[in-house]
Amino acid sequence: MELVEAPIPTPGPGQAQVKIEAAGVNFIDVYFRIGLYKADLPVTLGQEAAGTVTAIGEGVTEVAVGDRVAYAMTRGSYAEYAVVPSWQLIKIPDHVDTRTAAAAMLQGMTAHYLTHSAFPLKAGDTTLVHAAAGGAGRLIVQMAKMLGARVFGTVSTEEKAALTKAAGCDEVIFYTRQDFVAEVKRLTNGRGVDVIYDSVGQATFPKGLDGLRPRGMMVLFGQSSGAAPPIDPLLLNQKGSLFLTRPTLAHYCANREDLLWRACDVLQWIASGKLEVRIDRTYPLSEAAQAHRDLEGRRTAGKILLIP
Ligand code: NDP
């Protein structure tokens, strides 16, 4: 990654120009950088930011110049300015600061669709959340608790365990030194959990199928440890008529209505103190490479922001 000078992009019809105050770093940026997800080079990474609208194109109705806005899912936020489809922009409520909004969008809306739509949790459900101290993980834990679920979380260190407990997690499992399936079985009297939210992939996915109750659901939504291996569909039958989904945020925020539902819930919960977004570290934009090293090296616990 290199910091380069580029012309300020101008908005076309249906687009707005945003002066970026903070850009979120997400694992998806790593996947584009290493080529796991494809993009034409050179590419400006970054799928999330918040800042101020500085110009709008023809036909834009959702925002006006001067609005504080946040967004996710449009690439190019590791920059001072970005041009974003206006339907993707969310006005930031007065009582939420711009950096927090930047930190909340992608992982917040992800936690929202996972817990409210992919497998809608209800009171009394039991769930296992992998990498529970992570950016997405810690928000999933909090939303699962809001919905009344019993929540187990996996982490690698004592420090991350403490952060996960502080987020409301009922039981913390050290998957680096404990057999997480045996723990899940012990904690559920042999039954297994209703749903696993798995962002870790290779290291946890195959084994996790043994930790679900009959007809439970595996929500595999990431691959921080590497891609999950392919499985024979018959395995789902043998392990208890299980359900498997591999969802992505774009399909759960495909229109303005869904985007407003999820983003407004997340920002309102932050404003009212129901949801805490933990900004773990901030870096100048010029240190984006170090931010990636720290994220990939499991050194972070929460959100990483780049400040242009
Ligand atoms: P995290 O903050 O969760 O960081 C990754 C964490 O994964 C680490 O801190 C670490 O926690 C854990 N981990 C376990 N094994 C490894 C490993 N071998 N290498 C690195 N980390 C490991 O990142 P994000 O919240 O940004 O993203 C988590 C995952 O969720 C990513 O795969 C991302 O692509 C995915 N995602 C998917 C979305 C979707 O819609 N499908 C949307 C958003 C994110 P510990 O040290 O406790 O093990």
Image (tube, helix red, strand yellow):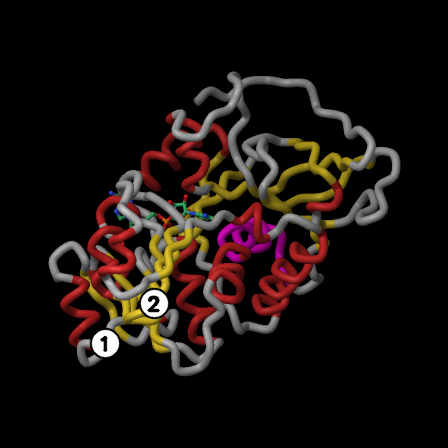
Three-letter amino acid code at disc 2?
A: Gly
**Image coords of residue 207 (percent x, y):** 20, 55
The region drawn magenta spans 96-108
Q: Is residue 64 above or below residue 84?
A: below
Cα distance between the residues tagged 2 and 1: 10 Å
Residue positioned 61% across, 62% down in the render: 267
- Neighbours of disc 1 within 10 Å: few (<14), some (14-19), many (20+): some
Which element carries disc 2, helix, strand or loop?
A: strand
Question: Residue at position x 62%, y 66% from top?
Answer: 265
- Position of the N terminus by quadrant: top left
Classed neighbour count for the residue bearing mark 2: other residues with Cα under 10 Å, few (<14), some (14–19), many (≥20): many
Judge whether residue 171 is colored magenta.
no
Residue situated in front as seen by the camera: 143 or 229? 229
* Residue 216: mark in rendering: 2
Vertical arrangement, residue 6 with respect to residue 26, above or below: above
250 or 74: which is nearer to us?
250
The label on residue 191 is: 1
Q: Looking at the magenta stretch, what is its main secondary structure? A: helix
Residue 163 visible in rendering:
no
Do callouts 2 and 1 mark residues in contact (Cβ within 8 Å)? no
Query: The C terminus appears in which quarter of the rendering?
Result: top right
Q: Position of residue 30 (x, y in %)?
A: 40, 34
Q: Position of residue 249 (x, y in %)?
A: 53, 49
Q: Is residue 269 positioned above or below 68 on the image?
A: below
